[in-house]
Amino acid sequence: MGNKNSAAQAQETQQSDDENSPSSNKSGVFLAQNFQEELVQSFQSKAIQSQFELFQAKMISSHNETISQDDQRRHTLHRELTKWRDHNAQVQSSLDERMDAARAKFSDAEVGLRYDLGKMEETITNKVPKFGNTANACIDSRAELTKCYNGVNDIRKCDGFVEAYERCAKQTVMSS
């Protein structure tokens, strides 16, 4: 019933089965060689696929775990950065307040000093005697002191004239 090729293939398969089968006096179930190879290959393929699926599951869980750890680290770093920024803002605010207080204190001191200097200048201008204009105050004491300095080698001998001149100057300043 078929063509020549199919009959030849069936005969070759029968011959190869006879060659691979045990002697004809033994009984049992025998599988064709190519069917045996197909079974072994199918089993190996399932074992490899099972191992690959286990490997793939481990890789996926490891990847997911790494992503989770990275997210936790990012969250921790973000929280610490926010905390640091808040602390930095507080420190900067404190420093700004201290600088403003120091500037205000300096400005107050400057205004006070300017006022005091103005008052002093006014006092000096109005109340201090002008020695050149007060009828040559202490002219005698000054002349005696000058003569003493010009006539001696040791200026200690003129101490009395110095004291007299100082007394005269104090009296003139106090009385003015």
Image (cartoon, grey):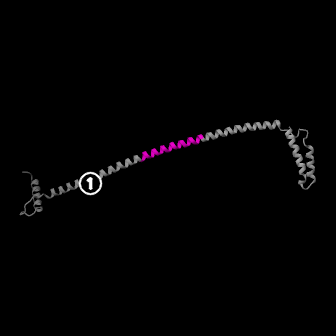
Q: Image check: 108 left or right of 51?
A: right
- Residue 99 drawn at (x, y percent): 61, 41
> How many numbered dots are placed on residues in this image?
1
Q: Image check: 63 left or right of 95?
A: left
Q: Which residue bears the numbered disc 1?
A: 51
Residue appearing at x 90%, y 53% in the figure: 157
- Residue 166 drawn at (x, y percent): 87, 46
Looking at the rendering, the stretch of residues picked out in magenta corresponds to 73-97
User: Where, quadrant-wise, is the C terminus in this rendering?
Assistant: top right
Can residue 91 be found in the magenta stretch? yes
Identified by mark 1, the residue type is: Gln
**Is 2 drawn above or below residue 105 in the view shown?**
below
Residue appearing at x 90%, y 55% in the figure: 154
- Between 44 and 59, the one lying in front of the other is 59
Residue appearing at x 32%, y 51% in the figure: 59
Q: Image check: 38 left or right of 116?
A: left
- SS assignment at label 1: helix
Can residue 176 be found in the magenta stretch? no
In which quarter of the view is residue 115 placed? top right
Residue appearing at x 64%, y 40% in the figure: 103
Q: Image check: 147 left or right of 60?
A: right
- Residue 13 drawn at (x, y percent): 11, 57
**Is 16 drawn above or below residue 70 in the view shown?**
below
In which quarter of the view is residue 96 placed? top right
**Is 113 drawn above or below residue 5 in the view shown?**
above
- Residue 172 drawn at (x, y percent): 87, 40
Other-residue count near label 1 (Cα within 10 Å), few / some / many at <14 / 14–19 / ≥20 = few
Name the magenta segment's main secondary structure.
Answer: helix
- Between 171 and 104, the one lying in front of the other is 171
